[in-house]
Image: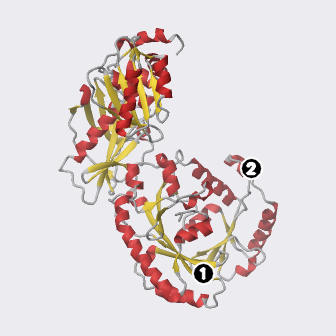
Amino acid sequence: MPGRPKDKLKYLNGLNEKDFPFLIADILSVHFNHSNIKIMDGTGDGKRDIFSVDQRGNNVITQCKFHYDFNKTSGSSETDEIVIALNKFGHNHGFFCTSGKLSPQSKREYSDNYKNFNLNWIEGHEMVDIVLENPTLRRIWFENEKIHLIDNRISIPFILRKLPEGVLFEYNFPESLALQNGVHLKIKQKELINPRQLYPLNHLDIRKSINAFGNAIGYCATIEKNVNFNSINDVKEEILNALVNDTNIQFEDSYVSVRFGIPYFPEQEESYRNFKAEKFNLPVNSETYVVYKDTFIDEYDFLIDVNEDWKLPDRIHMSQLDNLCYYNREQDFVFYLEYTCEVNKDLHPHIVRQIEIEKVIWSKSLFIIVNNNSDELFTNYPPSESYKYTDNYKLLCWIHPTPMIYPADVIEFENSLKDDNFESSKTLIINVAHHNNLEIIDWQKASKIIAIDNDDPFPLNPKTTYRLVDIFEEFSTIPSPINPESRSFIFECVFFVSEHNDQLLKERIDSLGELFDEIGNVDYYNFTIDNQTTNSIFLRVVYNPAYKLHLSTLENLKILSKDAQQSFDNIERKVKKIFPKGNRYTNNYWFEELGVFLKRD
């Protein structure tokens, strides 16, 4: 905001000692993107501390010092106290915030005397700039040419789901509650919520939902009186604690997901007339918590948290992130977590586009139905793929080649897709088909035939899988609440079995296969012989067991890790029976063949 610093101080005239730390807390949240804000009790002299976590995960202590005289200068004796507080709690990052000013000398000493600390300050005129330049802070704190806590209302939509059943969960909240700092909370039930406020929303199966004309059925919590930005977190905690502390809610084989939508400033009178009107949303993303047993946790932690037995690789290159996994150093096997959901055109545009690209390629391809004795007709033009079609027929597919480089736009891609060699061969194949009265079908019918006994090339509701690296980097794009049955717990162990010059390799592998036939739940396993390496031959064993849907990933791992360990120990014994030099080799394999340091010795 332009103007002299001293001229801006007049805007602070509406501020008082009680509201000052709440203003600073909102500035930390909205302007500096801090989280986990906690305002501590004050000493009665206008000084209060705030604990928070910055964007990089550093613990931060902020000291607030309010003066009614906005021209008052804080000296070294006051700024030194923040360093004392940082030393006390073992933190290195701090703010000193005053409604007045800092003297040039104290600023110098503040920076020069404590080089081991990351120290910052905010003076009165800087607060004015921050508040007036930020629409959210201005809406909450600025009115009638003064900075003060305005009499605002904020609404927070939310929904409840019972999982893994995937149904609405109905709960009777008290209509009115009083929060800290005199904030009033009212909760309306069976509200229509625009899905955009819950984005990205995992919609209920239509058979398990109530007809809400495209909207979600849920609740709306509205707070008023002494409302600041950080009151939103207080409301969420109050709602979650109400569910956790209700002994009538039974959590035997299920849990409750609470998805909080984007908060907004409601109209004075909400009605169907302004239901679809654009709202003044606050900069808070939708988030989901899982309530079960006697606690609640963030949905991210429910999905991704593991115990101390599992470590990420000590070193992995960006190009190797496909192989990102957790590693059990004691047992020498790895664990992948995957999550599968339906493709959403807004969340996964690259997948939708790729499907459209594939459709264009298939539309220019060739599909012919032949009987089982007609393969020799196309000896000179072998098909790309062949699929069984009833007992006596096959579907032969000649798929158009995909260029290495092509336009991003699907229409441009379709217009540019042409391969002269393929078109020439295609004409000859069509002539053979016509000469022998064979049926040529279009790509849509071909895809339906393939889908009978194989994966549908173009399913009505295509799915996408988030690997571990995707969950870390793109968790916010996973529609929520998550479906617990859409997780996959995948364990892998690698065994060295032999050298390439082993004369008995084939017989030994056959013998090993016979031993593996004795393993129970064989459908949970996948065995692969890797003989594409330079010197050695390896056995890669993937184990994908069933798990308990209502338990978190952490709790499932406690059970499944022991199960996987026993399974791999059993397989290792069988390997050593057949291969004299057979041994567990996961860590070394990852380094030698994949270039990933699971563990540096």
Q: Which labelled disc corresponds to residue 392?
A: 1
- Which is nearer the eye, 319 or 173? 319
Residue name at image x 41 percent, y 73 percent: 565
Q: How is the image coloured?
A: secondary structure
Secondary element type, mark 1: loop
Residue 360 is situated, as x and y percent measured from the top left of the image, at 67, 55
User: Percent x, y for residue 256?
Assistant: 30, 50
> SS for tag 2?
helix
Say what amino acid the circle numbered 2 marks: Asn
Q: Earlier in the sequence, mark 2 or mark 1?
A: 1
Whole-angstrom CA distance, mark 2 to mark 1, is 38 Å
Q: Residue furthest front?
A: 113
Residue 409 appears left or right of 301? right
Visible residue check, residue 183: no
Closer to the camera, 434 or 453? 453
Q: Residues within 10 Å of mark 1 (few under 14, many from 20)?
A: few
Residue for badge 2 = 415
Spot occupied by residue 129 in the image (x, y as percentages of width and height):
48, 18
Q: Quadrant of residue 425?
A: bottom right
Q: How many marks?
A: 2
| Label at residue 576 | none
